[in-house]
Image (tube, rainbow, N blue to C red):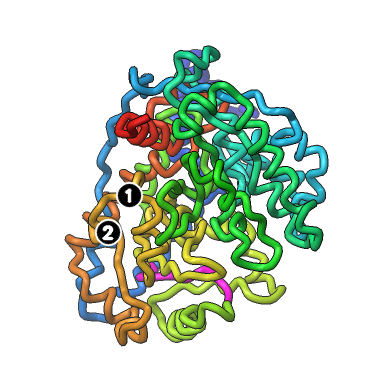
Amino acid sequence: MFSGEKKPPTLFRWSSSLLLFLSAACLILWFPSSPDNLIQQHQQHDPPSVNQTQDPNKTKNDDALITSTKPPSFTVPTCHKRVSVYVYALPAQFNVGLLNNCHKLSFRTDMCPHVANSGLGQPLPTSNTTGWFATNQFAAEMIFHARLLNHPCRTYDPSRATLFYVPYYGGLHASSKFRERNLTARDELDVSLVDYLRAQPTWQKHNGKDHFMVLGRIVRDFTSSWQGAGRLLKLPAAQNMSVLIIERNPWQGSNQHGIPYPSYFHPSTWQEMSTWQNKMRETRRPHLFSFIGAKRRKAAIRNEFIKQCGESTRCMLLNCGGSSDEARKCQEPSEVLKVMSESVFCLQAPGDSFTRRSTFDSVLAGCIPVFFSPHTAYTQYRWYLPEKGSEYSVYIDERSKARKRIEEELLKIPSKKVKMMREKIIDLIPRLTYANPNASDFGFEDAVEVALASLAKQVKKSNF
């Protein structure tokens, strides 16, 4: 190799190798990877700002495309003296036994890959990064169960418990019965659960008022309001309990409390969470707004979004309708997060129901959600979101004329306000995220911790 030349001294060669090794290590630490190299895509292929390329006159939102880094502070959650959770050891037929027929849990989707890893689903193909999974949007009840089985606030002594958790996979059961015409067969498991609970001394003590369950599907799937739904939440015993659900009834759900849809990120440490938050603060956002979704017969406003976004040079559209390559991208977490993390605002239109998992994907990506119905978030997730919606989101009434000029309305928002909203939603990421169930002392308050603290306060106010 050094033929005809003087070989370098051994010390010099060792020093060079060490320098190269340290340089590579620094790069890995400074630029941690994310799903399917999302971060690397931002760094290597940052296109110019849409506002800058299309308009020579600087708009109010130009300064909002890049934000400064603000290191968040984390504390290790500890069990409050008011929180002591007893987890019922239900017969397997009510939860894990349902997973034996995972191929039949949904007539639309093979749920077997999605119920793996305690409901987190399959790990996403990443390099040097853990915590990312292809999580199904209806998996909250499984993730919650796994978290509480390994939770420091769990007690095995029911006499010491302040909360009683009923780990029923009601959402998975409901989706498996959507085509069941025999109503008795459809409701049999729900009724059996109620009979089981009523026979327990722990239930009889307060008639279930200190009990709660978690449901991973929307409220109409449990109220017989449409063909195929069950009637779990119409049973008197279920109405005595607190119900944590991904979409509650805004008008009649006094015992229902909205919890986040699971997104794709389930960190095990506060360092993983902090790294992602900082990356979302630093990333450039060349698109003023974006929309990811398909047309819906019951939500004509989506057609308006698709039209406006397609005609705008400041909007990124990912049309999920049909069977095109673009539609298939909507099923890829990396594609969804890429669009959102490159956008300042993300349109959140109602679809088959008021709420969307997309809202929580948007927050995870640091993209400010734009709502068109108060029931998409404001009346749903009061335990999790600030009381003032304007602190973290934009609201445009779907019945107003403003919905026909979305780009114009968003450009009116001052850059200072945009920065404040983005910082707020990035600060919200931990409490809207489900930590990995196998983690302990992960150092931040996740969605489960928020729910337990809120339930404890509610039970304390109750007069048994």
Amino acid bearing label 2: Gly
Q: Which residues are magenta?
A: 286-295
Q: Residue at x 37, y 72 (%)?
A: 372
Residue 116, given in percent of the width and then of the height, sits at: 71, 38
The secondary element bearing badge 2 is classed as: helix
The C terminus appears in which quarter of the rendering? top left
The N terminus appears in which quarter of the rendering? top right
Residue 118, given in percent of the width and then of the height, sits at: 65, 34
Crowdedness near tag 1: few (<14), some (14–19) or many (≥20) residues, C-alpha within 10 Å? some
Residue 178, given in percent of the width and then of the height, sits at: 73, 60
Q: Is residue 288 magenta?
A: yes
Q: Nearer the viewer, residue 28 or 435?
A: 435
399 shown above or below 369: below
Circle on res. 428: none
Main SS of the magenta segment? strand
Q: Which residue is mark 1?
A: 385
Q: Residue at x 49, y 59 (%)?
A: 358
Left or right of 356 on screen, residue 282? left
- The answer to whether mark 1 and mark 2 are in CB contact below 8 A is yes
Q: Nearer the viewer, residue 255 or 444?
A: 255
Left or right of 371 on screen, residue 86? right
Q: Nearer the viewer, residue 197 or 166?
A: 197
Q: Residue at x 39, y 39 (%)?
A: 430
Circle on res. 389: 2
Amino acid bearing label 1: Leu
Q: Is residue 76 magenta?
A: no
